[in-house]
Amino acid sequence: MASLNVYFVLVVLFLACVAVMSMKENDQIIKENNCETKIGLPCVLEAFMSIFETGSISNKCCGELVMLGKVCHSALVKRTLENPLFKDLSPATIIAKSIQTWNNCLALIDSPSPSA
């Protein structure tokens, strides 16, 4: 019985270490890539609303999001999910919406203009 308790404690410690490493990893990615300086606040808010709420993102902000880059986009979304304010949200749903927003913006930016 004691070995079961020791095993449980080790598993909990391992999961806690993985969570801390993940948080540090996202922060490191954001810092190394200057992610927070690559997109303007209005576009951050639009992207946030389209991922974490129900909103849309303008063509202008799609352009800024794509210029931000997928690595920064993913790290910023994951770091936001680590915030206790968002603990009740489903990470799988948010990640799916994040990918959908990214793909929609990428397709919009990559597609030729109708007037071209």
Image (cartoon, rainbow, N blue to C red):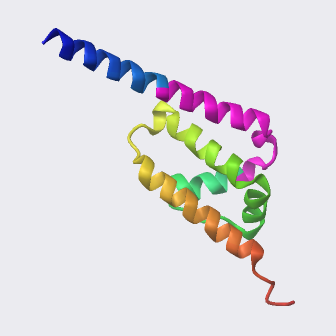
Pinpoint residue 52: horizontal percent, then vertical percent. 51, 52
Q: Residue at x 78, y 35 (%)?
A: 32
The extreme top residue here reads 2
The extreme front residue here reads 3
- In the image, taking residue 89 as reference, residue 51 lies left or right, namely right
The extreme right residue here reads 116
Q: Is residue 32 magenta?
A: yes
Residue 89 vertical placement versus 65 (above, below): above
Residue 12 vertical placement versus 92 (above, below): above
Q: Residue at x 76, y 40 (%)?
A: 36
Q: Residue at x 48, y 29 (%)?
A: 19
Quadrant of the image containing the C terminus:
bottom right
**Image quadrant where residue 98 sits:** bottom right
Pinpoint residue 90: horizontal percent, then vertical percent. 40, 48
Q: Residue at x 34, y 21 (%)?
A: 12
Q: How many numbered tags mark residues here?
A: 0
- In the image, taking residue 6 as reference, residue 79 lies left or right, namely right
**Image quadrant where residue 101 sits:** bottom right
Write the start and end of the magenta stretch as one range.
Answer: 18-43
- In the image, taking residue 95 as reference, residue 11 lies left or right, namely left
Q: Is residue 89 magenta?
A: no
Quadrant of the image containing the N terminus:
top left
Pinpoint residue 45: horizontal percent, then vertical percent. 66, 51
Residue 91 vertical placement versus 85 (above, below): below
Secondary structure mainly formed by the magenta segment: helix
Residue 111 vertical placement versus 54 (above, below): below
- Res. 5 in view: yes
Pinpoint residue 87: horizontal percent, then vertical percent. 42, 37
Q: For this rendering, which residue is in front, 43 or 83?
A: 83
